[in-house]
Structure formats: C-alpha cells, structure tokens
Image (cartoon, rainbow, N blue to C red):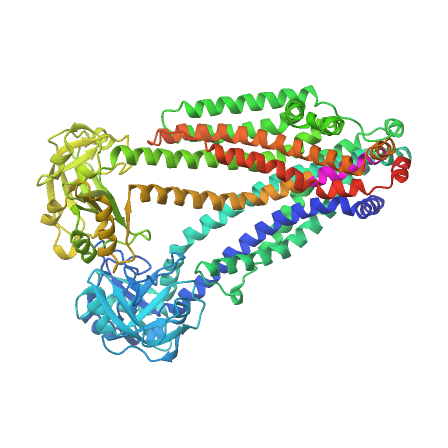
Amino acid sequence: MTVMKTSMRNFLAHKGRMALSAVAVLLSVAFVCGTLVFTDTMSTTFDKLFAATSSDVTVSAKGASDSGETTADNGKPPVMPASVLGEVRKAQGVKSAEGAVFSTSVTVVDADKDNLSPSSGAPTIVGSWNANEARTMKITSGAAPKGADQIMVDADTADKHDLKLGDEIGVISAIGTHTAKISGIADFTVTNPGAAIFYVDTKTAQQTLVGESDVYTNVNVTAAAGVSDAQLKNNVTAELGGGYQVKTAKETADANQKDVEGFMNVMKYAMLGFAGIAFLVGIFLIINTFSMLVAQRTREIGLMRAIGSSRKQVNRSVLAEALLLGVVGSVLGVGAGVGLAVGLMKVMGTVGMELSTDDLTVAWTTPVVGLVLGVIVTVLAAYLPARRAGKISPMAALRDAGAPADAKAGWIRAAIGTVLTGTGGFALYLASAADKAKDGSLWLGLGIVLSLIGFVVIGPLLAGAVVRVLGAVLLRMFGPVGRMAERNALRNPRRTGATGAALMIGLALVACLSVVGSSMVASATDQLDKTVGTDFIIQSDRGQLITPQAVKAAKSAPHVERVTEYKLTQADFTTPDGKTLKDTAITAADPSYATDLRTETVAGKLPDAYKPDSMSVHEKFAEDHGISLGSKIKVAFKDGSAADLTVRAITSSDVVIDAGAMYTSISTVAKYVPADKMPLDALVFASAKEGQQDAAYKSLKSALHDYPQYIVRDQTDYKDALKDQIGQLLNMIYGLLALAIIVAILGVVNTLALSVVERTREIGLMRAIGLSRRQLRRMIRMESVVIALFGALLGLGLGMGWGATAQQLLALEGLGVLDIPWPTIIGVFIGSAFVGLFAALIPAFRAGRMNVLNAIATE
C-alpha cells in the first residue's frame, strides 16, 4: 500500500511531465483501436448487405464465381437457359422462384458521356428489377423500369451525380451501348458501401448484358414455410442434377464476404503495422521520461532507501507509476480510437465508400487489446529506468546534488551495438549479393532489423561524434549560445541518442521507401524506353476489358497507322515432358505486337510465334519442361478445343514488361475458340503515321469519347501515370508513418521540457550573469534542432542503405536502375530542422519565463 501511495503521489506531482508520454500511449492505442473498430464496422456493413440481398437459395450458371459475379473473359456474364426456372419451381419446398440477370462488366455514362462508376473502386452493377431486389431497395421517386427505354438508379448514385427522373443515361457492355431514361430512384434499406446499381426490366437486361433472350444469370428461390435453406438446396440440386451452382443464403453471403475480406485484411494489418511502429517510437519516449524523472529524483530515492525502502520497493514504485501512465493513456486511447474510426468512415465517404455510424461495431476485444497493449508497452519501457532506480545507493544519492552526468555509454553497450550493427550490415551485403530475390529478401529483413537495433544501441556513441560535426557546421556561428546548445546536447549522450533514435525510425522507413519507389519508377521508365515501340496505349484503369465497339472506334481514328489487339486467356498445357499444367496464362495478340514490344529472344524470332498454330515460351519455362525450338505443346483453350502449337521462339525471362508471357496470335486462338467465347482485349496499342503523333493522339481521344472507361496515353502519359500510382501509394504510407513521427516529436518536446526542469538552477545562474531571455530561448531551440538533425542523419542514412539493398533485389526481377530521390531526402532533412524548432517552442517559452532568484534557489 505504501508503494502505491508513493507512486500515486509522484505521478500526480509530475503529471505535467507525464502528459506527453501519456499522449504517445494515447495515440498508439487510438490507432490500434481505431483500426479494429473501422475494419469491424466495414465487416458488419458488408455482412448486413450480403445477408439482406441473398435469397434463401440461389442457382447460378456453372461458370459463375463463388459470389456469383461475372468471370467470363468475353465480357458477358455466364448464363443458363430460362428453362431452369421451371425445373426449380418443381422442386419440393419451393415457395417461389424468379429468374434474374445482372453483370458487373459494364460502364454507365450520363448524357455528357461522363462515367457514373464509383471512384472508390466499388462495382457498377446493372441488373433486372425483381422481387429479391425489392427486399433491400425502396423506390423513393418515380417507378420501376418497364420497357427498354426505362432504367432505375440507386439514390446514392443519383445524389453524387445530380441525376433526376427523365435524365438519359447509357449502359456500355460487350453487346454495345444501350440508352434509356431514368424512370425511378430507389434507396437502400441497408447501408450501401458504395456500389452504383442500375435496374432495367428482365427482357432488356437479357438483350443488353448477354445479347440473348430466354437466359438468366441466376435464379432466386424462396423456401416454403418450415423448409430450411439447407433442405431446399438439396431439393433443388436433386431436381436440377449437375451443371449448376446451388448455394444457400449463408453460403452466398460467405462467398461475397470472402471477396472483400482480402482487401480488409490487407488494410487492417498494414495499419496495425504502422501502429506497431508508433508503439516502438513511444517506447523511447517513455524510457527517456522515466530515466530523467529517476535522475531528477535521485536525492528523494536516496532518502527513501535511507529510511528503509528496499530496492524492490523502489523498483515497484517506478513501475507502478508506469502502470498508472499506461492505464490512463490506454483508456483515453480507446475512446480516441472510436473517434478515429468514425473519422475514417467520414474520409471513406468522401471517396465514395459509404459507411453508416449506425453500423459502428466495437467488439469487446477491441478495448481489451488496446488496454493490454498500452499497459504492457508502458511498463516494459519503464523497466530499465525502474531497475536503475532500485540500484541507487542511499549514500551516493545523498551526496548527489543533481542529475548524474552520463557523458558516454558503457563499453558493454558499445560492444553490443557494434556487433549488432556489423552483423546487420553483413546481412544487407548478403542480400545485395543474392542470386535469387526470394533468398535475398530473408537477408534483407534480417539486416534491417539488426542494423536498426544496432543503431539504437550504439546511438549514444554516435551522438558525440555527429553532434560535434553538426555543432561545428551549424551552431558555432551563433557564438557562445551555439556552443552552449552543443554542450547541452552532448551532456547526456544516452538521452540524446534515445531521443534521436525515436525520430530515426520513422525517417529511416521514409528514406527506404522513397529510394525503392523512385528506383521502381526509374527502372520501369527505362524499360519502357528500351522495349515499347508503340505510340499509344489504350486501357481501363479499373481493369475493365475493352469492348469490340471501342476497338472499332480506335481503328477508325484518322492519322493512326495500325492498332494492335492484346488478349489474355487461359489454357491447359501438356508439355513435351508429359506434364499437364492447368489454367496456364497465354497471351494472344496481333502479329504487330512483336514490333510494339521489343522483347528479347534467346532462340528463334518472335514474329514467327504469330504464324498459324505457333507460339512462344519464356526461357525459364522452356528449361523447366525440356522445350526447344520446334517442340509441340498441346494447348486446350478455355471455352474452346485443343490445339498442337509449335514453339517458334523462346523469349528472355529477364524482362519487366510482360514478364513470363507466352505469345500466340489472335487468329490461332480464334481457330479453336468460338467467336462468342473469344476473350475481349485487355489492352490496345496504336501507332501513328509518320510525323502525325500529335494529330493521332487527338483523333484517338476523340474516337473514344463515348467510352470514358478507357484512357488513351502516349508514352509520356504512361510514365506519369506509373509515377503517380507509386507516388499515391508512398504518400499513403508516409501519412501512416506520420503517426510515428508525431510521437517522436513529442519525445523531443518531452526531453527538452524535462531537461529544462533538470537544469533549472543552471538556467537561473546563466540568467543572473547576463544571458537574456531571447538568448536562452535560442539556446534551447538550437539544442532541439541539433537533436532532430542527429536523428534525421541516422534515419536517412540507414534508410538509404536499406533502400539501395532492396533495389539490388529488384534488379534480379528486371528493375535494375538505382535512383536516389535527393530532393525528397534533402527536403526531409531540412524539414527535420523545422521539427526541432517546433518541438522547442513550449520548453523554450517556459524556460524564458523562469524567475531568476527562484531558479537559483532550486536544489
């Protein structure tokens, strides 16, 4: 009880000094809890949606995916004959059944040809209006579609694009473009996470999406009273026999949930990873806080020991303070995490993913995880300072007039740090020298971990040398004030090292990712310059296949010399070694693709692969299966018949663009695959007539104006798009790393604030002998800047080393250009100086307001 009372008294006595550490715990716990609440809420939203939209039993065509969505390469949904509906109705236990048609391989545009698809990446769905849809949609204005000239839209999409009754919109599918006017607007009775949904009548859906009458994509079955979904499924399956997918409502919902689960897990674990980094940075803050508080209370601890307190009691007292800090910070963090989750939901709403706070899900495990993590991390971080406090002898403490100086780290620490850093550096060397990227990645991970830990351990030794160099370059010009700032930073190398290490971690990751991202862009750009011989690339950024109508429009554009089609399909390969390889990718293209992409061959000539019944394979595939020029491979095409294709060329496996591709001609595939099953183009390439590139560029854009889902890019545009994609990913990562950097800034603030308290008497004496308030504030700001720059130098240097090693592994995959983004590196370094200035504002202000006489009188 006495220990707890002492701990409570000390905690309350130093509550101001504990505040920033508590904020660090709060932020880290909030990020963890916010992530869990946010992803749980997304899961709840999708669960409710899928449960509400699934009929008791759903019958789908054999080619449909588990969730029932379109999977056909020809842009049409897999269908079954309408006669299936009659057979289903005969099954025992069926109350009602109705046929439906829907597709996600569509684009919907308004009268100005602007795309109405969601910007969030959620699907655009066009389907038939039926009783099953009416369970989750309520018509709020107008009426359901009747006839080919009418279409109904969901209310969210209507609001986003300012659509109203009577507006004309167009549905673009593999069949063509169908126009209709809005007859009604329907609102969801459950939360819509962002999909754009349009309804037409069944006959129109059949003709518009499939091009056939008397077919359905699925049949929705309702069970009679007292019949379970499982029993109904068995009855329907018995009636239909094989050849169809039959799923209960739960199975359909689970399959749909599985489709979004992967995305949510990636988001969840990525965000938790960054929260872990913030926790790691927070550990340095807590260690520094308790180390300085213990040092400042040396005399007090000595008195406690002198009157009978044992080492264990002193140790427990400090750990109890840490426990209080962890509990307070964690409790506040849990509450802040819920607020953060709501904020994330609002942010997702701005990009098109609607999440309702009515579905806000706070599982009981979330606050438990937050509290346990926050408390354990705080107590563990305080363990070393607590142990140090327990070792203070009564007499040594009573002789100590203030905080003990720690001019240099012990030789054991130096030895351990040197060994770890050296081992980490050697692991990075092994990674860079690896022959295979997979093997090298293991050494890279080990090298990053060991070198990071090594730099943290050896930080106090590095602090002395680095701070002296920074002082000579930056501080000496400010005269005595600059020299005092340098000496203050050098006074306690362990503290300076720990404070700089907190900033080092975040900046090391920033530098590493910057080098990797910049090298990827530079390497891809280099590959494009070397290999791509076409002028224009036409594709959809949403992964949509290119319809025949759009290809025809591109071919009709003036000033265009040639258009090359490029299709992706799958086939079962039977190789000369007798092995059968299921669902192997094969690329079908026009013969001009051999010119559009200058792929290096190790045997044969690539144009020969486009001859009738011919193909190419890549070098590694040929080695694995004993294939040489003239070898025959039996290729059983998906949705088609089998062919014996002759290998006419073997391409290099050391490429980036189309790595691992095996080519054949479109005419060869068309010989064995029926016309209605031929895959649509994944890409289209176009080349301008000599000297008419600008005119061809404009004419292609004009020709594809009616197809806004496709983008025409020249090589410059393509490079810019690649750079933007990687840049957006890096910016998102930098935003998540900002949490760790904010915690590190709090660490600098806390270190300065506590050091000001520690040096109260010294500051009073300096003021008494003539140091002005302005000079005092400048000294503290300079000390803060040099600590921040010390952390930045270590972090940026370490991160560039990691990034350069990672690039060596990427070079094994063809990305062979190392590019150091010096503007980013220099900008981050300069920004670190401003971070130091910002962190020093409050401590410098408080130091300047000290009463000189009271400060001198402080012991």
Please give the name of the residue rendered at 86% of the width and 26% of the height, measured from the top-left corner: 396
Residue 446 is at least partly visible in this image: no
Compared across the picture, whether 196 is left or right of 359 comes to left
Compared across the picture, whether 425 is left or right of 839 comes to left
Residue 206 at what x, y percent from top left?
21, 69
> Where is 286 relative to 493, above or below?
below
Nearest to the observer: residue 502 or residue 54: 502
Magenta part of the chain: 749-761
Magenta stretch containing residue 741, yes or no? Answer: no
Residue 744 at what x, y percent from top left?
63, 40
Compared across the picture, whether 346 is left or right of 108 comes to right
Please give the name of the residue rendered at 38% of the width and 79% of the height, measured from the top-left corner: 141
Magenta stretch containing residue 759, yes or no? Answer: yes
Residue 788 at what x, y percent from top left?
64, 34
> Where is 640 relative to 654, above or below?
below
Choose top left, top right, bottom left or bottom right for residue 314. top right
Please identify the quadrant where the C terminus is shown: top right
Choose top left, top right, bottom left or bottom right for residue 438. top left
> Where is 328 relative to 473, above or below?
below
Residue 452 is at least partly visible in this image: yes
Compared across the picture, whether 498 is left or right of 43 comes to right
Nearest to the observer: residue 624 or residue 649: 649
Residue 106 at what x, y percent from top left?
28, 61
Nearest to the observer: residue 678 or residue 577: 678
